[in-house]
Amino acid sequence: GSPCAAALVADAALAARRRIDLVHKVFALSIEAFRAPLEHYDAALDGLWGDEHEAAALQGLREYLTGAGDGRRNYQAPVSYRIVPRVLGQAHRALSGAERAATVSLASISDNPVYVPPDEAYPLGRCISTGGYHNAMATPALDDLAAIWADVCLLCDRHASKLLNGKVSLLPDLLMTDRHWADSDGHGNVGYVPMAITGYLE
């Protein structure tokens, strides 16, 4: 019933706040490794986009990009890098919804029946039957969190694909140096990169 739903959405909201901070760190690291132009995360966008959650995403990224290196690309990064603040903005929006649902739900008197204390009209109080056991806020909030985590995972996949492709990332192909990706690493692991790629595709 409602107490269980309140607990679930509260737990999800607590986990989401920690997870969003981790997501900011991961994408900031990817942005720095890719040498994406910092203009994609410029402070001017906070006001131009006009959304508090997307502004929070931009600010979170800039916090971890403070002191970012020089030698950045003088052309725009792929779409998957430019849309990071928008996607993270939705994560902040979903978190806000979950936190509000948790705050209201945890304080809600959801018993059925519920006893209403005495007042002038009812000196003995009242016992009334309600539908308070049904929490209509929790499920949509949990759905929104689940949806944005799926979007974040997909965006991480796009970043990983770009970083592993040396022609795009301008880094060593498959992020490997001093040996071919199909060679043994000296510990009996032969061709683990193509094996991992095949497993992912399956």
Image (spheres, rainbow, N blue to C red):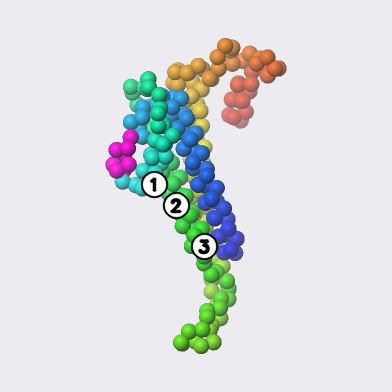
The amino acid beneath tag 2 is Ser
Picture coordinates of residue 5, whole percent (x, y): 57, 59
| Residue 202, quarter of the rendered image | top right
| Residue 44, quarter of the rendered image | top left
Picture coordinates of residue 62, whole percent (x, y): 39, 35
Q: Nearer the viewer, residue 4 or 194?
A: 4
The amino acid beneath tag 1 is His
Q: Earlier in the sequence, mark 3 or mark 1?
A: 1
Tell whether label 2 touches label 1 (CB within 8 Å): yes
In the rendering, which numbered label is found on residue 96?
2
Q: Earlier in the sequence, mark 2 or mark 3?
A: 2
Please name the residue that numbered disc 1 is placed on: 53
> Image height check: is 165 above or below 42?
above
The residue segment tinted magenta is 42-49
> Image height check: is 166 above or below 90?
above
Dot 1 falls on a residue whose secondary structure is helix
The amino acid beneath tag 3 is Ser
Please name the residue that numbered disc 3 is placed on: 105
Q: Earlier in the sequence, mark 1 or mark 2?
A: 1
Q: Is residue 44 magenta?
A: yes
